[in-house]
Amino acid sequence: MKKSTINSRMLHMFIVLNVLLLCVVVSMTYFELVGKESLMSNNYNRRLKAYEDGIIRGEILDRNGEVLAYSEMVEGISKRVYPYKRLYSHVIGYSNDRLGKTLLEAKYNEMLLGKNALGLMGNTISLVTGEDKTGNNLILTIDHDLQTRARELLGDNRGAIVALNPKTGEILAMVSTPDYNPNENALLENWDALSTDGQSPLLPRAVRGLYPPGSTFKVVTAIAALESGHEAFTVDDQGSIVIDGKIFANAYDKAYGPLDMTTAMAVSSNVYFTALTTVLDSKDLIKSAEKAGINRSIDFDLATSTSKVGKTIESKTEYAATTIGQGQLLVTPLQMALIGAGIANEGTIMKPYLVKSISDRSDVVLTTTKDSKLYQLTDATTADRIKEMMVEVVKSGTGKKAAISEVTVAGKTGTAQNEKSSLGSGYDHAWFIGFAPAEAPEIAIAVIVENHAEDGGQIAAPIARKIMSLWIKELNH
C-alpha cells in the first residue's frame, strides 16, 4: 500500500476522532450549562427522589403567616400535607411521588428543597444536631381569609376569581372551580375520575382558561376610541344596528336613544360600541388590545395561557363583534383583572406575582419580590376618563349590584356568548371587572361565572362587591 494512501487514511481517521471529541465536548458543555438543571429537576430522576425523601419540604404560607402547605416525615419519607385541601389546589398545586409536581410546587421546587441562589443545597442539618434536613419557605401575597371567601362565593359554579393590588401587582386571591383535594391519598384515589372529568377540575381556570370577555372588553374599545380622538362620538340607539348584513342588538333588545360614550358604557350598549367601527380603525383597536397584554405572554409565577385576538380583522362583522368582546377574541381571567388594575393604576399594569418572599428555616429572608411594571396600557388622562365611565356603570348602569356603601366602586359587567350558548345548549358566561375605592384603589378584581342563567350584573357583580368590601373594610389594615 502506498505511503500517501496510508497518510490519507490516518488524516481522515484523525479528523473523525476530532469531530467525535468535539461532539462529546459540546454535549458535556450543553449538559453542564443547560441540561443539568432539567435532568436534576425531572420527576423521574431517582437520585432526586431519593434526595427529596430525606428532606422536609419547606412550608408555603399566606401573607399573614397562615400555613397552606407543609411536609412531615413518615417512616423516613417526606409526605406533603395540604390542610385546606381543595382551597389552594389551583395555586399551590401538588407535590406527589407518583404524579409529580404542579404550579407553585413545581415552579419553586428547588427553593422548597433548600437550594439557595448559589446552586447549593442549604439547611442540610446536621451531623452535630441530628435534625432533619429542611427546605426553604414560600410566603405568598394571598390573603387566606379573602381566598376562603372567594371560594365560598363561587360555590358549585364553574368559574374563576382573581383579586390583586393594582398598585403593586400582588395577587390577593386566586380561585378556580371546580377544584380538587391535592392531598396524596385523595389525589391518587380520585385521579382517574379527575383526569377524565369533562368539567376539567384539574384546569387552573384563572390563568389557563380562555373565554370571550363580552362587554368587559368595552373598556379596551373605549381606550382605543379615546386615543384615536373619538370621545365625542354619539349614537341614536334604537336597540339594534345592521353591519354588513348582520344584526347586532342590545341585551333584551333595549333601545336607549341618544348616547355618548359614558352613558353607552353605563348601559353597555352594543349598538354604540359596534357603531364605533364606522370611525375607529380596527388597527387602533388591536393596538390597544395588545398594549393591554393580549397576544403577549405574562411573566408570572404560574404558567398562563396567552390571551389572543387576530392581528388583522378582515370582515366588518368580525370587527364589530370584537368591539363588544366577542368574535375570535379570547382572554384569561388574570388578563381581565390586569386590565382593570391598569385603569385603576393610572394606565400602568404592574407585573402580577404570588410569591412575596422566600425565607429559610430560621425565618431569614433570602429573596423578596420587588414591584415592577409589566405593560403601559394607556396614559393617565385616558385611564382617568375610563375610570369615570366605570364609576358610572356601578352608580347608574348595569353594575349597580357591585356598589359598596360609602365606597366609590368602578366596574364593568359582561355577558359573553360561547360555544354552548350560541348553539342553544347552555347559558352565556357572566363577567365583572372592577376596582375600589375608585379614587385610591386598593383592590382590582375579575370574576367569571361560566354558563350561568343570570348575566354579569346579576351574578358576577355581587360576588365582586362582597370580596372588595371584605378587603377594604376588614382585611386591609
Image (spheres, rainbow, N blue to C red):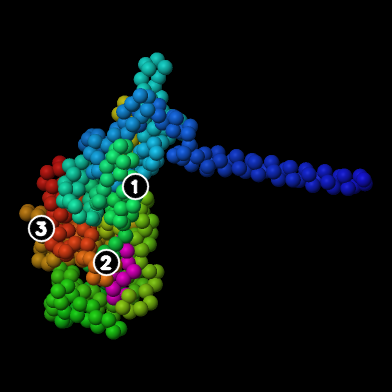
State the extent of the magenta-drawn residues as a range.
Answer: 319-331
Q: Amino acid at mark 1?
A: Asp
Q: Amino acid at mark 3?
A: Ala
Residue appearing at x 34%, y 71% in the figure: 284
Element carrying mark 2 = helix
**Disc 2 versus disc 3: nearer the observer:** 2
Which disc is residue 403 wearing? 3
Which disc is residue 420 wearing? 2
Residue 122 appears in which quarter of the rendering? top left
In this view, the residue in front, 398 or 276, is 398
Q: CA distance from mark 1 to mark 2?
A: 26 Å
Q: Is residue 189 above or below residue 450?
A: above
Membership of 303 in magenta stretch = no
Q: Which residue is mark 1?
A: 192
Report if the CB atoms under discs 3 and 1 are less than 8 Å apart: no
Q: Is residue 111 above or below residue 234?
A: above
Q: Is residue 137 above or below residue 351?
A: above
Q: Position of residue 70 (x, y in %)?
A: 29, 33
Nearer the N terminus, badge 3 or badge 1? 1
